[in-house]
Amino acid sequence: MVVFDYPPLDWSVNAERIKETGCVGVLQESCSELIALGCDEISPPRFYTGGLMPSYAIGECIHQGNNPPNPAYFKKPAGLDSRYRSYIVFYEDDYRLVIKRTEFREIFAPVESADEALSYAMAMTSLTADFNIAPNANREYLAGVIEETHVEETPAGYVVHLFDSDHRMGCDTHEFFAVRVLVTQSGEVSELSREKIYTSYACFDFDGLTLDQE
């Protein structure tokens, strides 16, 4: 099995941008605007935000109760953590809940660089980046060549190489995939290919928050 390596991301930017807002973790009374929107806790998102332009801070807004103020903007990802979640964008001196791809595109399109395409693709698809692929005796490899996460610029837009799992909860032998995604300058995202690259025993307790299609 051959692996093509690429430079990793600096994930610290996710937490740093959230900290700059002064509202992170379990929210205090001083974060009253966020609390009014239904956020009891703010955590960094699972996708890399460092390439997005404009460089607004983005967090996961977590609601502890069963009745968020605006149910259309909150969802429960599958798994053991059953709290309601949404994305919050610290947008032009205000806060905006975002749960639809169209809303995200409205804020962050057009996409004009490879770094921006990487962050944008991860946010829009909930696919993951991987820069640490190495031979592992506990995996059954199904592909002879695996390319770590990177971006290729093409006439049609940016082709982003990302990864996915089968999204089944619990401990079992899971399937893992290499996925190529096209991001156009206007912010449209489409999956170009999906290849099963290995199977491995793994445990998944909960799935990540995803943006709705529309």
Image (tube, rainbow, N blue to C red):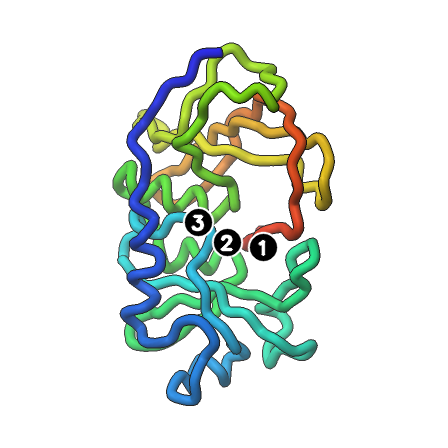
Looking at the image, can residue 111 be seen?
yes
Name the amino acid type tagged 2.
Arg
Q: Quadrant of residue 29?
A: bottom left
**Residue 31 position (above or below residue 201):** below
Q: Position of residue 41 (x, y in %)?
A: 50, 73
Q: What is the crowding at mark 2: few (fewer than 14 residues within 10 Å), some, or many (at least 20)? A: some
Q: Position of residue 136 (x, y in %)?
A: 53, 21
Residue hosting label 1 = 212
**Cα–Cα gap, marks 3 and 1:** 15 Å
Give the secondary structure at mark 3: loop
Q: Is residue 71 above or below residue 210?
A: below
From the viewer's side, name the closer residue of 98 and 58.
Answer: 58
Asked whether residue 214 is in view, the answer is: no
Which amino acid, mark 1?
A: Asp
Q: Which residue appears at 37% of the width and 45% of the height?
A: 119
Q: Are marks 3 and 2 in contact (CB under 8 Å)?
A: no
**Front: mark 3 or 2:** 3
Location of residue 181 with respect to 56 vertically, above or below: above
Q: Position of residue 45 (x, y in %)?
A: 45, 57
- Assess whether mark 2 and mark 1 are in contact (beta carbons under 8 angstroms): yes
Instruction: Determine the secondary structure under disc 1.
Output: loop
Instruction: Give me the disc on residue 99.
Output: none
Q: Position of residue 44 (x, y in %)?
A: 42, 60
Q: Amino acid at mark 3?
A: Phe
Residue located beneath label 3 in the image? 47
Whole-number angstrom distance, CA of label 3 to CA of label 2: 14 Å
